[in-house]
Amino acid sequence: MKKLFNRAGFSLLETAMVLTVAGLVFGGIWVITSTISENTRQEKLMQQTSYIISHARAAFGQSRTAPDTTGGAMTAAAIQAGIFPADMISTATAAPRNSYGGDVALSHNVSSLPPVLELSLGNISRPACVALLSRMTRDADVRRQSGITGAGVTDTISQGASYQNFSGDLKQRQITTICTSNSANPQQLALHIAFRYY
């Protein structure tokens, strides 16, 4: 009489194959989710930046003067004037935060002619820097409408940036160079955008 063995469970090879396929599926989902999350944060950063620049220009453009403040006082005055979107103001610190969770500051540079405001966005990624500058500064006409005159990067928002002043249409290489210079940290940087308010 022949004895039949009843197979219960999976062989080692079958288990390995199932785990490999599951790992590939979960890995693919992870990559897609990360890409969507980064794109969403970049888009939100662009909206926040456009909002701040347009509202600062509206608030200070008619009088052709910005508050004569230094340090964080200009940012505090801008918060009270409604220049920052409400979703940027952290209830815990009452300080603005960008879509990457980094600090945001607005300062007044009276030494340049014409005087400019400087928007500093901390803790953003290099791809976000390139995407933001590509959309807002590549075309000279778009730059003129928003009053943007230059940009630079540093490691933190408290460091002074050395600006590349813009003229004419920018090439992608120029924008990438701005986002890779003057920052030791390849993952996070502070972007400083100078713009005329009148």
Image: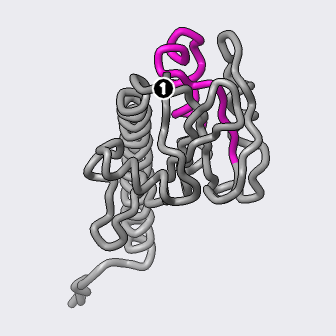
Q: Nearer the viewer, residue 174 or 161?
A: 161
Snapshot colouring: one colour
Seen in the picture, residue 183 relative to 4 is either above or below; the reply is above
- Magenta stretch encompasses residue 38: no
Image spot of residue 99 (x, y percent): 40, 51
* Residue at 24 percent of width and 89 percent of height: 3
- Magenta stretch encompasses residue 147: yes
Image spot of residue 107 (x, y percent): 55, 47
Callout 1: 10 Å neighbours few (<14), some, many (20+)? few
Residue 99 shows in this picture: no
Main secondary structure of the magenta stretch: helix
Q: Would residue 188 be found to the left or right of residue 72 on screen?
A: right
Seen in the picture, residue 188 relative to 46 is either above or below; the reply is below
Residue 19 lies in quadrant: bottom left
Image spot of residue 4 (x, y percent): 23, 85
Q: Please name the residue that numbered disc 1 is placed on.
A: 64
Seen in the picture, residue 183 relative to 147 is either above or below; the reply is below
* Residue at 57 percent of width and 50 percent of height: 125
What's the magenta region? 130-153
Residue 97 lies in quadrant: bottom left
Query: Mark 1: which amino acid?
Result: Arg
Q: What element carries label 1?
A: loop
Q: Which of 85 and 132 is in front in this view?
A: 85
* Residue at 55 percent of width and 55 percent of height: 122
